[in-house]
Image (tube, rainbow, N blue to C red):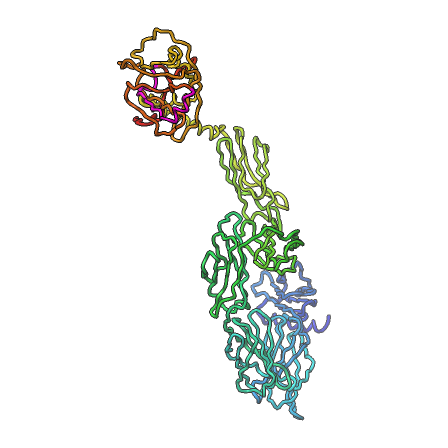
């Protein structure tokens, strides 16, 4: 056994004798150990007892026995801090323990860099930084050592402890050094409980590492194109560099030609700036030799406004469903064009609408449809208005761009086109696009040159369906367009089925549906309706993407289930909810039902009116007037029969009674009846041409009739051959007046008689109908006695 272990055991035995613990514990390499090493932990007990020896965190290792009172652990490749403990079970004395710390020795410091920061003309601070290497995990110290020399005299070394840092962050330390020192030598010492190590020695000439403190900048004073900035420096410098940049852009450098050993504050101007821009400024300085100072703290200021430089980018469109209105759009100009804060927009529609002012947060304006109107839009800031942007509300149909080809990818859409050879050369193109069905709300466009024939769109939302058009523009602002549809940069199958409503009406079912945009996954190509009966699909209906309603007709009585799906380029999506339909009866067509109801109402009204005797009489008279379309044969009249018997002389008289005539009636003389066109305001007019009448016929009455055979009524007026004026109509209430119904002159005298005089006609008031039934058949030939009727006063004096 080595003597060192024997001596150690002797010391432990003495401690046991004088202490109150039951044991003593120690390791063969101490309490701080480099990670990865192997060692032993011993535990010596005061007397023999039942021993307990453990490590924390626990392992499955069991202690080994060195002798009756000594036990130990063999520890291999330790990788963490651990605690070991020993205990004599059954003893009243305390147990003993040992904490083991693990880590790494420090690495050699490297990448030492020093600067001489001069804050006054008399002295400055030498600041050195270095890389300490990997983290030792253990507590470590780093010390900067330096020696100085001024000519042949040297001082030092002096030390300065580095400030503590976490992990592998660089360390730094500094010394105050007079301006008279010319050279310095520096090195770094790092140490912990495991080891101590020194870096290499680095030599510096202070003029080579001299650095002024950063300049101090005042608040800039700016016009629209220039800013003046004040710079202050605490030491005499030789060089100054000023940098500036607009917000969110890169730095630009302005370096004055001569600083003239500046110490007092001086002002410097920065020109060639843009109006209404927020500019940031910073500066740094340098001695004749040495290093540039660090950058100063940034300062900033706005340049003043100017009137907008260019016209707005303007476009117009109208709804695909509402053609009564239009909408003009404009893009918000970037700051280089607006040159200030826009406070309002102006719109005028010539020749319809006077200028209208709109707030600065508006980017479109709606107006009533105006074909071939000039729309003018301008913007205004505090310094003035932009040049007017003009566009004509005209679309032409001839020679639009052809062969519009769309190429889709996961991130963008490429669109190309060709201009017809016969079309006028355009001044440019406009490509517009928008989400399907949201043209007015989300239209976007880009203007392209006349030589462009393709464009790349990269700001489309994924899984959204777009459509748009390519327009060619000409000098008069007119243009024609070619549309494209169903464009999506990313496509996935629909996430759900359409949401639908069903309305059952008899044996018909009306279905309306909609699929939210977020669930479409791209451009829908088709909708499907599934109708199930008795647990099997009874019928399917495929509908195009543009359709949102469908009517299922003539369903048999029964119970059904209805659901829907949507499809796009990736396939058919999941089905929607199931709706149960009940068809309980077959509905009578609405038109037939309405006809029945209206017919029944009319019949009921007629039946009610028919209860009045006056209405009943007028109804029969109207019916008789309607039946007059059949012209009676004049040969059947009594007058014609008497005329044929008396050979030239006929007495026409009224019968005094209803007794049957005794004498035998002769064969009637027939006459031709011609119907003339009805003049306006007359019910009917008859021109009666006798064909077999004697040349002279006289009408007379021998006696005054005491009674009438028929009730009183009005006769139809007999018109002359050469006049059908309504002024020739006469109605007499004298019942004893004879009736000149058919001319008594022969055929040869008719025309002469008409030229010399007007025939006077007399009418006798009689009841319209005889006492026969209105529905009797008119058998044989009708007689003129029964049809000389005037219906012109039919609706007069109707009193119900």
* Left or right of 747 on screen, residue 152: right
Residue range in magenta is 747-771
Question: In the figure, residue 33 lies in which quadrant?
Answer: bottom right
Query: Relative to 384, does residue 287 appear above or below in the rendering?
Result: below
Q: Position of residue 676 (x, y in %)?
A: 43, 26
Q: 140 or 660, which is in the foreground?
A: 660
Query: Relative to 660, does residue 304 appear above or below in the rendering?
Result: below
Direction bottom: furthest residue = 152
Question: In the figure, residue 57 lies in which quadrant?
Answer: bottom right
Q: 482 or 752, which is in the foreground?
A: 752
Say which residue appears at 50% left-offset and 53% top-offset.
370
Residue 169 in magenta stretch = no
Residue 768 in magenta stretch = yes
Q: Position of residue 639 (x, y in %)?
A: 37, 14
Query: Relative to 704, does residue 322 appear above or below in the rendering?
Result: below
Q: 674 or 430, which is in the foreground?
A: 674
Query: Relative to 259, does residue 674 appear above or below in the rendering?
Result: above
Say which residue appears at 34% left-offset and 8% top-offset.
661
Looking at the figure, which quarter contains the N terminus? Answer: bottom right
* Left or right of 33 on screen, residue 685: left
Q: Is residue 466 visible?
A: no
Q: 532 or 469, which is in the foreground?
A: 469
Q: Position of residue 547 (x, y in %)?
A: 55, 42
Main SS category, magenta section: loop
Question: In the figure, residue 252 lies in which quadrant?
Answer: bottom right
**How many labels were placed on the picture?**
0
* Left or right of 260 on screen, residue 738: left
Looking at the figure, which quarter contains the C terminus? Answer: top left
């Amino acid at each position: 056994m080595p003597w060192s272990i024997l001596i150690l055991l002797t010391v432990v035995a003495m401690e046991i004798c004088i202490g109150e613990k039951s044991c003593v514990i120690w390791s063969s390499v101490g309490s701080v150990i480099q990670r990865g090493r192997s060692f032993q932990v011993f535990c010596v007990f005061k007397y023999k007892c039942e021993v307990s020896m453990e490590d924390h965190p626990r392992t499955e290792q069991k202690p080994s026995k060195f002798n009756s009172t000594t036990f130990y652990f063999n520890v291999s490749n330790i990788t963490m801090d651990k605690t070991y403990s020993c205990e004599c079970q059954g003893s009243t004395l305390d147990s003993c323990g040992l904490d083991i710390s693990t880590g790494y020795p420090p690495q050699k410091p490297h990448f030492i860099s020093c600067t001489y920061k001069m804050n006054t003309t008399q002295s400055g601070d030498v600041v050195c930084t270095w890389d300490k290497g990997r983290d030792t995990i253990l507590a470590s110290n780093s010390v900067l050592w330096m020696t100085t020399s001024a000519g042949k005299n040297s001082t030092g070394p002096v030390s300065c402890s580095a400030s503590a840092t976490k992990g592998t962050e660089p360390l730094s330390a500094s010394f105050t050094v007079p301006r008279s020192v010319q050279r310095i030598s520096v090195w770094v010492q790092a140490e912990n409980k495991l080891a101590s190590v020194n870096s290499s020695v680095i030599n510096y000439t202070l003029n080579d590492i001299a650095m002024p403190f950063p300049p101090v900048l005042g608040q800039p004073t700016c016009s629209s194109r220039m800013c003046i900035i004040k710079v202050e420096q605490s030491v005499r410098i030789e060089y100054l560099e000023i940098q500036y940049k607009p917000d969110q852009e890169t730095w630009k450098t302005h370096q004055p030609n001569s600083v003239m050993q500046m110490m007092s504050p001086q002002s410097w101007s920065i020109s060639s700036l843009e109006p209404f821009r927020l500019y940031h400024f910073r500066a740094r300085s340098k001695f004749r030799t040495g290093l540039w100072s660090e950058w100063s703290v940034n300062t900033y200021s706005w340049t003043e406004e100017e009137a907008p430089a260019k016209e707005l980018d303007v476009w117009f469109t109208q709804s695909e469903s509402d053609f009564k209105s239009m909408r003009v759009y404009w893009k918000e100009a970037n700051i280089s064009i607006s040159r200030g804060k826009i406070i309002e927009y102006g719109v005028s529609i010539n020749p319809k609408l006077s200028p209208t002012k709109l707030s600065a947060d508006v980017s479109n304006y709606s107006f009533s449809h105006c074909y071939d109107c000039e729309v003018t839009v301008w913007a205004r800031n505090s310094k003035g208005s932009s040049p007017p942007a003009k566009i004509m509300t005209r679309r032409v149909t001839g020679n639009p761009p052809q062969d519009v080809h769309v190429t889709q990818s996961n991130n963008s859409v490429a669109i190309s086109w060709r201009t017809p050879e016969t079309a006028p050369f355009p001044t440019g193109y406009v490509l517009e696009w928008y989400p399907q069905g949201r043209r007015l709300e989300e239209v976007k466009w880009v203007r392209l040159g006349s030589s462009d024939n393709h464009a790349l769109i990269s700001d489309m939302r994924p899984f959204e369906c777009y459509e748009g058009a390519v327009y060619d523009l000409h000098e008069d602002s007119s243009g024609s367009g070619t549309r494209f549809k169903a464009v999506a940069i990313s496509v996935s199958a629909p996430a759900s089925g359409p949401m639908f409503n069903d309305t059952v009406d008899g044996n018909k079912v009306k279905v309306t549906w909609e699929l939210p945009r977020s669930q479409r996954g791209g451009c829908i190509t088709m909708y499907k309706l599934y109708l199930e009966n008795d647990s099997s699909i009874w019928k399917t209906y495929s509908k195009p993407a543009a359709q949102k309603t469908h009517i299922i007709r003539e369903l048999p009585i029964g119970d059904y289930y209805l659901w829907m799906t949507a499809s796009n380029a990736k396939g058919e999506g999941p089905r929607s909810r199931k709706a149960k339909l009940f068809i309980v009866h077959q509905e009578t067509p609405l038109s037939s039902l309405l006809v029945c109801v209206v017919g029944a109402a009319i019949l009921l009204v007629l039946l009610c009116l028919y209860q009045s005797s006056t209405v009943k009489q007028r109804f029969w008279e109207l019916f008789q007037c309607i039946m007059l379309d059949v012209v009676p044969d004049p040969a059947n009249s009594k007058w014609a029969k008497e005329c044929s018997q008396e050979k030239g002389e006929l007495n026409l008289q009224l019968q005094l009674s209803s007794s049957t005539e005794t004498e035998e009636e002769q064969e009637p003389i027939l006459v031709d009846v011609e119907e003339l066109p009805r003049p306006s305001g007359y019910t009917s007019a008859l021109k009666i041409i006798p064909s077999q009448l004697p040349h002279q016929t006289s009408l007379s009455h021998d006696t005054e009739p005491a009674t009438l055979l028929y009730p009183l009524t009005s006769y139809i007026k007999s018109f002359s051959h050469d006049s059908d004026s309504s002024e020739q109509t006469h109605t007499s209430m004298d019942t004893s007046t004879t009736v000149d119904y058919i001319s008594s002159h022969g055929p040869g005298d008719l025309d002469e008689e008409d030229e010399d005089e007007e025939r006077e006609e007399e009418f006798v008031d009689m009841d319209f109908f005889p006492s026969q039934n209105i529905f009797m058949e008119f058998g044989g030939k009708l007689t003129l006695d029964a049809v000389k009727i005037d219906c012109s006063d039919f609706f007069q004096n109707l009193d119900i």
